[in-house]
Image (cartoon, rainbow, N blue to C red):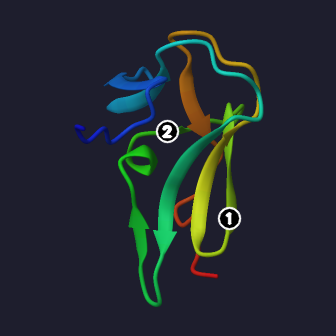
């Protein structure tokens, strides 16, 4: 078994928004939980590979659902192959619960 830092349906490539971005490598249905993007510890917010590459958008394709010390990246709409995954975030979008 080999380590795969991202779900099988995502890839990282250059973004027109900023630097590198997270993109669908195949169609993804609305409401899909793509996995854990951030982990909250007692005094830190740790970003996973999934959380390290999505960009900000005023019209996001995903949102973060926070529960039990984890932030999960969830799709807001159906995505096609090549669509960039984005969320609406500010400078400090996720705070320790």
Q: Can residue 32 be seen in this view?
A: yes
Residue 56 x %, y %: 56, 41
Residue at 45% in and 26% down: 10
Q: In the rendered view of the protein, which quadrant contains the C terminus?
A: bottom right
Residue at 45% in and 34% down: 7
Q: In the rendered view of the protein, which quadrant contains the N terminus?
A: top left
Q: Which mark is residue 55?
A: 2
In contact (CB < 8 Å): disc 2 and disc 1: no
Q: Distance between the residues labelled 2 and 1?
A: 18 Å
Residue at 43% in and 45% down: 50
Front-most of residues 34 and 46? 34
Residue 68 x %, y %: 65, 74
- Is 12 on the left or on the right of 29, as rendered? left
Residue 61 x %, y %: 68, 31
Q: Work out whether 10 lies above or below 75.
A: above
Q: Is mark 1 on a helix, strand or loop?
A: strand
Specify the farthest residue to the bottom: 42
- Is 6 on the left or on the right of 24, as rendered? left
Residue 92 x %, y %: 54, 67
Q: Is residue 93 visible?
A: no
Q: Work out whether 46 lies above or below 50.
A: below
Q: Is mark 2 on a helix, strand or loop?
A: strand
Nearest to N terminus: mark 2 or mark 1: 2
- Residue at which label 1 appears: 66
Front-most of residues 19 and 76? 76
Q: Nearer the viewer, mark 2 or mark 1?
A: 1
- Is 19 on the left or on the right of 67, as rendered? left
Q: How many numbered badges does the structure rendering display?
A: 2
Q: Which mark is residue 75?
A: none
């Amino acid at each position: 078994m080999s380590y795969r830092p991202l779900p099988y349906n995502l890839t990282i490539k250059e973004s027109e928004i900023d630097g590198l971005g997270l993109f669908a490598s195949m169609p993804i249905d609305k409401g899909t939980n793509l996995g854990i993007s951030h982990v909250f510890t007692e005094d830190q917010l740790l970003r996973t590979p999934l959380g390290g590459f999505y960009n900000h958008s005023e019209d996001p394709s995903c949102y973060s659902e926070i529960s039990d010390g984890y932030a999960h990246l969830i799709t807001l709409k159906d995505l096609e192959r090549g669509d960039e995954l984005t969320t609406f975030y500010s400078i400090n979008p996720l705070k320790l619960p």
